[in-house]
Image (cartoon, helix red, strand yellow):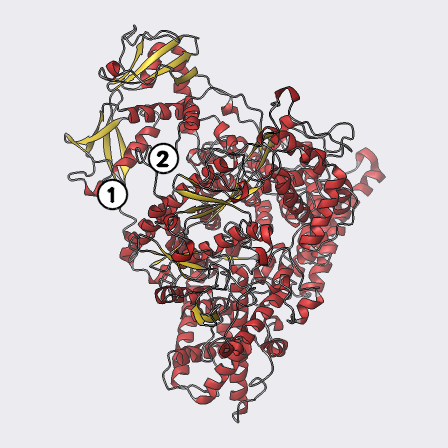
Amino acid sequence: MVIKTDELPAAAPADSAREHGSQAGGKGRPSAAEPPSVMLLNGDCSESLKKEEGTTEPPRENGLDEGEPGEETTGQEVIVIQDTGFSVKILAPGIEPFSLQVSPQEMVQEIHQVLMDREDTCHRTCFSLHLDGNMLDHFSELRSVEGLQEGSVLRVVEEPYTVREARIHVRHIRDLLKSLDPSDAFNGVDCNSLSFLSVFTDGDLGDSGKRKKGLEMDPIDCTPPEYILPGSRERPLCPLQPQNRDWKPLQCLKVLTMSGWNPPPGNRKMHGDLMYLFVITAEDRQVSITASTRGFYLNQSTAYHFNPKPASPRFLSHSLVELLNQISPTFKKNFAVLQKKRVQRHPFERIATPFQVYSWTAPQAEHAMDCVRAEDAYTSRLGYEEHIPGQTRDWNEELQTTRELPRKNLPERLLRERAIFKVHSDFTAAATRGAMAVIDGNVMAINPSEETKMQMFIWNNIFFSLGFDVRDHYKDFGGDVAAYVAPANDLNGVRTYNAVDVEGLYTLGTVVVDYRGYRVTAQSIIPGILERDQEQSVIYGSIDFGKTVVSHPRYLELLDRTSRPLKILRHRVLNDREEEVELCSSVECKGIIGNDGRHYILDLLRTFPPDLNFLPVPGEELPEECTRAGFPRAHRHKLCCLRQELVDAFVEHRYLLFMKLAALQLMQQKASKVETPTSLENGGPPSSAEAESEDSVGPEAGSEEEGSSVSGLAKVKELAETIASDDGTVDPRSREVIRNACKAVGSISSTAFDIRFNPDIFSPGVRFPESCQDEVRDQKQLLKDAAAFLLSCQIPGLKIGIGELITRSAKHIFKTYLQGVELSGLSAAISHFLNCFLSSYPNPVAHLPADELLSKKRNKRRKNRPPGAADNTAWAVMTPQELWKNICQEAKNYFDFTLECDSMDQAVETYGLQKITLLREISLKTGIQILLKEYSFDSRHKPAFTEEDVLNIFPVVKHVNPKASDAFHFFQSGQAKVQQGFLKEGCELINEALNLFNNVYGAMHVEICACLRLLARLHYIMGDYAEALSNQQKAVLMSERVMGIEHPNTIQEYMHLALYCFASSQLSTALSLLYRARYLMLLVFGEDHPEMALLDNNIGLVLHGVMEYDLSLRFLENALAVTTKYHGPKALKVALSHHLVARVYESKAEFRSALQHEKEGYTIYKTQLGEDHEKTRESSEYLKCLTQQAVALQRTMNEIYRNGSSANIPPLKFTAPSMASVLEQLNVINGILFIPLSQKDLENLKAEVARRHQLQEASRNRDKADDVSTDPEPATALEDTGSPQTAKEDPSLSLQG
């Protein structure tokens, strides 16, 4: 059983850096005042599904999350997925038969994929599988194949080639030849990305058993590289991407390319020629190869002479590899080695990621010939012709059809979500490619005669528009600035409506791409919209921001089903003819029925209510919390809205308040038994009632009322549900209680808690009917309260660094800077900007493209220029002084922050920033890729960057991330079980979630990463180190691949893996992983970061374990300094840090220092926890032990001084720390504490939990029978321990009930 260590002290201040989770409206960990019954994980529970920034899981509405699948889902639903596998025998030409494990719901096609990946069959692509002489259909499921069973023999039969099959074959061979080459990952193509874990683990960690047994005793080289030692000022960039041994390319061929003789002439087609290849072998032999329907053979053509006749040796081979093996011994040898290495790599290093990850640095690479890449670049490879020959994909139809798939049971939902995810990731890739083509000027506009900013494009059935205010559409909202922000807001709206997933309501596929300073919105196309005028098409909403507004009963019905989960109020507005129109969204949201009869909604940019802190409205006063902080502030656009997470947190906060107000009144009723106190009946506006109640029972009130109010809360919940179900059994006084509480928190219903926002309040140009003025007034107040809640409750939990502020300001400037640069000047312009931004060189000069290359006709303006400004060189005159002035101005205007410095160098000094970190941040934010080398930022003699250092510019892509809902619920249920201490059940649920995630997302995904991390932690706790290592290794690889090699998440995964390595006695691996994590931490954050303390404690402890005491002290003392800085000298974490340092001094026999540190720790424990606390007593014991050792040492020394060499010295006991004691300390600092429980204890614990559950049930039933009982509840004290859970689950139950 497991408990979280830093939750032990009841009176501990919230002193954990991870505490901020708990401020998100009570969603994080329970407060320190109420230690949870059983907790696990270092804050990972709340974090473990921290999805990409800014996404949340909105409430579902299809009844999917009413219960926890863990308990309610029927057994059969789950079993469908766990169909038992069986094995079949594969007979392929030229190799020994082998057996293969398959599962009934796999497709025949998946066996094809396996064979194309296996070392001995990977060179085959064009074959079919036969069972008893019958060919199996590619797309049928194995369970539908008649006669296929355990032990069946499948024969691989070579099929004749077609042009398409021959192309696929050549592409596959090229992929095999490049399988160890990382250039696709550096270039950001084909969903390849980098991973460096294997460099630090020397291959797979699973072989721990096969390693040398006596590892503890083996000498290990523990010396860390100089640049990661505490206090080092050096921040090198090259170690970020260490050169992998396997990347030294094994050259199999010099050239493999399409021949210039393609396509075959008619007479050769009739001989079966499909295409010609040209090859130069490693031995420098040049050959020409014919791909025919029967296979590959050499022909007699040369570069300038066409002779298609076969050449000798007359060898026809069905596989290109077999032919090349015949003609080139080097190819034969190297290809075999290459394939052996390829299959030895961890699968997670090879599988494609669902979305492209770009690397901001890359080494200098040789540019090699590549036939496939060349063909892809110059054939209009629009969609994926390999999948759907000869036609582009109808993205809209695919996206909408997948949403229409049935979803009644688990297998149907999995199939549907898998299809949605697949189409969506394909659409995102296509949209990104199209957006880049548009900005690079390679796509013709559909309105070419208009000004470039106003042009729109269609490519591959996707519609592209630019983020400029083209027809004064956003004139009242901030012009171009608003037009730039609108697509991102719209995307958030699309994400939210998709998540609610109402049948019959459709959104467009939407991707927002920032590239070369431009913002491009890519959308799927509503059938028929291009043939009609927008005015005719829109049958719901407004096309002119609220002047003309129309509505439609079907849209109202569909949108009404989203209003509860999205907290949107159905409301009425006035149109230009003074008619009242009813809406259930903002006025900008447009409804269009496509030619396919589907109801689409688009322009969802105001789905969420406005943030009044940035929207000054004449005549409206904000609450005091806002005005005190200097709000409202005028912003450069009027589209600032509250994020969905904030709306949810605000509603949850209000819900807790509602429960507490009602509980308070019920208890007062109970106590007085006379009449309801009227303090809250008509008590002023909601905010005053809120203030009044928060003094007494607000969330901050701690635990005085906790005990008594828990039963009260349970009663309120019961009461609210009874009133909502509208049976007449509730007495009027209780109704009154609920009504008062509803009024006080701003609920739109007087019988149940229900908060919704009107998204049109404060929207310029929208008018409301006279009859709605009361409702409008309440809604305005609600928005003001939300604005105040954001400042007083949410923001204190967020921290944004100065570095972030500077790089964001620089990004805003860089965006407009780049728009004026033509393609030929791009690398010069970017390197000039970086020099002005980061180099200490006082006057960098921009290098314009060389004059002799400039055309004489430059003054004639080209018609089809890339969008945006004219070709110009205005960028070249920027200076560091001017850029810094602009950054300061931008920081003031946009963030209202004053940078008190005159230059970047001064800012770096003043705020303790690192230029390498700023370089990483600006590169990631803008898509720049730079050369991997050491940059001398501080040189005053030459600029840090040259144009050769800028390698590429990538798009920055925002898109919706479809969710695997069932898997997510299993995951959450698993987490809940683990938190309650049921590790085994939790583990099973998480494993089930992992299966479902794999089913929907494939093998690679951020959420799978979280699943693996939790599984690893659970296996570790349950003592299965090998399983923990295996899962955590996958988590690290996946985090590197899908989030980035130096993403903060990846750094944490490295730390967890190091712990499990240490526990498995792989000490040197554990150290090199920790050193890697520290290097990444230094690069990304610098030394001055609260997490650095945890990392240094880990390193210090491992070094202590291997008896490197001096080195260990350097890290532990740094950890102590950082912890003291961020948590204050009296924090419990500081006491633990003192203890760790004392232990190392004890091992060095420097008892005076050891005593000094342990005394510090003892003092903290004593003042914080009291003398009788177990921690204080432990510290006191240790002090005694140290004192005895010190005295013994002193005696010995005195004896030596007195008697010299003849002294009789008793042997001193200097104990090297045992591995077990080091591991115990490692577990403590990483938040894992084992409580030794016997089997009997466990049984008792489970029985106790069950008993409490029954008591709760019984008390509920009794409450129903006897509504107002005067007896105190017997279950109260027990319920209290469960309160974190109940409090956490309440809001969702009531909101969806």
Q: Is residue 932 visible?
A: no
* Residue 1265, image quadrant: bottom left
Single out the mark in the foreground, 2 or 1: 2
**Disc number at residue 104?**
1
**Disc number at residue 672?**
none
Does residue 1098 appear to the left or right of 442 in the view shown? right
- Given residues 985 and 540, the one toward you in this image is 540
For badge 2, the amino acid type reads: Tyr
Relative to 376, does residue 515 appear above or below in the rendering?
Answer: below
- Given residues 1182 and 164, the one toward you in this image is 164
Which residue is denoted by mark 2 in the rendering? 384
Q: Are marks 2 and 1 in contact (CB under 8 Å)?
A: no
Does residue 149 appear to the left or right of 1073 in the view shown? left
Relative to 443, does residue 23 appear above or below in the rendering?
Answer: below
For badge 1, the amino acid type reads: Pro
- Given residues 1148 and 181, the one toward you in this image is 181
Measuring 58% from the left and 65% from the top, which residue is drawn there?
31
* Residue 505, image quadrant: bottom left
Q: Crowding at label 1, few (<14), some or many (≥20) Cα neighbours within 10 Å?
A: some
Does residue 12 appear to the left or right of 335 in the view shown? right
